[in-house]
Image (tube, rainbow, N blue to C red):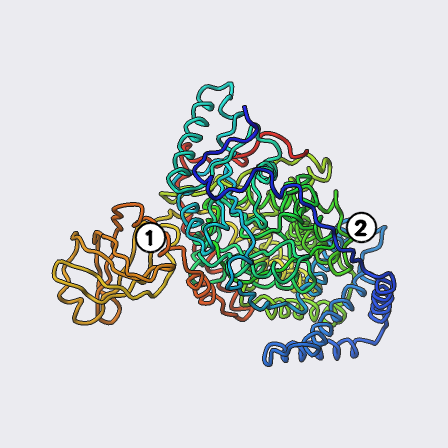
Amino acid sequence: MNHLISTAAAARKTRPAGAGAVRRAPAPHRRTPLALTLLWTVHAVALVWFAAQDVGLEGQYLLGAAALAGLAVLHLFKPVGAVRVLLILLVAFVSIRYFTWRTLYTIPPVDSSGFIAGLLLYLAELQGMVVYMLGLFVNIRPLNRADAPLPQDPDRLPTVDILVPSYNEEPELLRVTLMAATQVAYPAEKLAIHLLDDGGTVQKRSDADPRKAAEALDRHETLKALCEELGVNYLTRERNNSAKAGNINAALAHTSGDLILILDADHVPTQDILQRTVGHFLKDPDLFLVQTPHFFINPDPVEHNLGTFGSEPGENEMFYGVIQKGLDSWNASFFCGSAAVLRRSHLMSVGGIAGTSITEDAETALDLHAKGYKSIYVDRPMVAGLSPETFSSFVVQRTRWAQGMFQILLLKNPAFKRGLTLAQRLCYLSSSTFWLFPFARLVFLVAPLFYLVFGLKVFEANLEEFYAFAVFHVVCSLTMSNYLFGRHRRPFVSDLYELLQAVFTFGALLSVLVNPRKPTFKVTPKAETVDQNFVSQLAKPFAVILAVLLGTTAIGVYRWIHFPLEREHLMIVMVWHLVNIVLATGAFGVMYERARHQVAGAIPRSKPLNLITPEGAVRATLVETTIETGRILVEGVQAQALALAGGKAAVQLVVPGRDELSSIPVMVVGSAPAAGHGLVLDVRYMPRDAEDDGDLVRLCYGDSAVWVAFQESRRKRVPILVGVLRLFLRGLKRSLAMAGAARPSSRRAEALGAASFEQPIGR
């Protein structure tokens, strides 16, 4: 049996096997000069020394007031360049002052009853402070890159392989992604598309379980036929070694494109993805990666259950909308597994996709940056993916990310990785140490209880000192985060996501600490269906957390009444405690999974069309569409004469990538009055052939401007207190709706790790 099995469906597009797989480019030598490292070290030591100087409470208040004034300038005038950097450094200095004071003066004495609890809180704050400071460094000067248009001469263009790794995704989902890949705007003779099927390997088709073997064989034959129909190359391999990394590496040995576009199975590309990325490789021979954002056309379970998808930025937008641009400014934007173009020669210089960790993408970028190669980030969404639709699948995904980044920290620590610049070390440390948040998040959750329940003093300071140092630090850091990320992340939403993940990822991170090579790759379930409301089987920890927090609130009230001398300290603890209740309420509300009646991809748009009816043509507007259904607005007097409910019609419009009008039959399945005057028609597409199918894919997924417009419509900064109040009310509403809800039936697969590779990661 051959190691790799391929159809001849795309033989006309595939270069000779192995060509290019052995090409290796000499890596540029580029390291941080020792003198520069020493200079930064001296500055850091001097800064800490200055932060430790006693300027009195009055001086500290003046410094805090100056930082708040600087934040006001940042918010109101949005300065750039050196002014922006200086103001951010001023605000950062307030936090450095706080943590220096916190370290020197506030930890309880070793012989006190509160020492252990106080030390845990201090270590949690230390992790948070490290992440905060590294985050400020990463984002202090985000880079907005200019376009790099393709040359007019097609002979100058590099060849490109589009690789679509797949494991257990349904053929219907793969059909859409592969069809969209065939429509990517690029010369056909320079482009080859490959489906990498790891669900139909020889190993799986030879499984000892006849049922599993039959399922794998059926998948193998079905996907081969799909690839033949679409003119796509079907690739599989003997064994499922090293999960996704192994799947891609097996394909690299049998493809030859100069560049490689990797797409997850559910990441449907827009037509301009190569037009906006390939040009950068022509400008810089040392470039190994162009990464683009991951955009999702359905809400994740948090967004869906709290009802924020259409009105608030997505959870991943802070990373792709801000942080990746910050990393890019330091030549440290990294590979995110999909929606990325890589240069084959540079990738093969490190042996292909890395497999030491289960976050093979970031690890691969780390290795290539260490060899002196460059990466860039293009901030335009040009894929449409699917978020996990149940909370359990969301936890599977995030646990893999957390474990993988912790593996990188332990096995390939960026701080000591030879070849990285100082800035790159800090950037990779920022990305990897962030995932240690479960420890800090859980400590912050229970820390107020140390005082409320046990009376332990975990913070040695009087009220004046606390206000001068801690309050200014908290206010400045929250306001700075809202300045940097407010358009891409609402206040305290990050804290909610951290709490939701921390409960499950804390133990997973401990397992990595014990055995860094133990974790195995677990595939995130795709396209799950939630056809009725149900309470997640993972809800119990959050019910317990919320019950404990509400119960201990009564203890706080008791202390307030009966111990008036404690009220100053108790007030601080109770404010902290109430913030935790807000987060716990939101987390508990997320556990009530709402039925998903809307098909993924129903993104608002405004596209003119002709509605062809038995009575004639009517001008209308497509206001929403999926691959199966659409919503059409007919305005004015035209709507009054339109009686099509249950009738047949056709939509005539220009789809992306085609100049001539396309006509697609539709069935009108419902109608309703529009706001103002007019009529909204709900239609179901009735494609006649493959050409109509292609037009629907172009219509739904072809134009990246639709995704850009949708993202921009959600990016509105709100005040911190408004954000907290909205979060609490949404969580409270969902928590109350959960009362009396039935538990899910046994048919719904909620077990963590249900879809996973069985073999450990490693070579």
Q: Which residue is mark 1?
A: 696
- Observer-nearest residue: 2 or 176? 2
- Residue drawn at x 24%, y 66% is 620
- Residue drawn at x 25%, y 60% is 652
Q: Quadrant of residue 359?
A: top right
Report the amino acid beneath label 1. Leu
Q: Quadrant of the N terminus?
A: top right
Q: Label 1 neighbourhood size at 10 Å, few (<14), some (14-19), many (20+)?
A: many
Q: Compare marks 1 and 2 and give the one earlier in the sequence.
A: 2
Q: Quadrant of residue 469?
A: bottom right
- Location of residue 346 with respect to 246 vertically, above or below: below
**Where residue 162 appears, x then y in whole percent?**
51, 47
Is residue 174 visible in the rendered image? The answer is yes
The secondary structure type at the circle numbered 1 is: helix
- Observer-nearest residue: 270 or 675? 270
- Observer-nearest residue: 389 or 416? 416
The secondary structure type at the circle numbered 2 is: helix
Is residue 392 visible in the rendered image? The answer is no
**Where residue 723 appears, x then y in whole percent?**
52, 65
Asked if disc 1 and disc 2 are in contact, CB closer than 8 Å, the reply is no
Left or right: where 749 falls relative to 410? left
Q: Label 2 neighbourhood size at 10 Å, few (<14), some (14-19), many (20+)?
A: few
Spatial CA span between label 1 and label 2: 50 Å
- Location of residue 68 with respect to 362 vertically, above or below: below
Q: Which residue is mark 2?
A: 416
Report the amino acid beneath label 2. Phe
**Where residue 691 appears, x then y in whole percent?**
31, 49
Please tell me the numbered disc located at residue 15.
none
Judge depth for marks 1 and 2 and give the one in front: 1
**Where residue 329 appears, x then y in whole percent?**
67, 65
Left or right: where 558 falls relative to 94? left
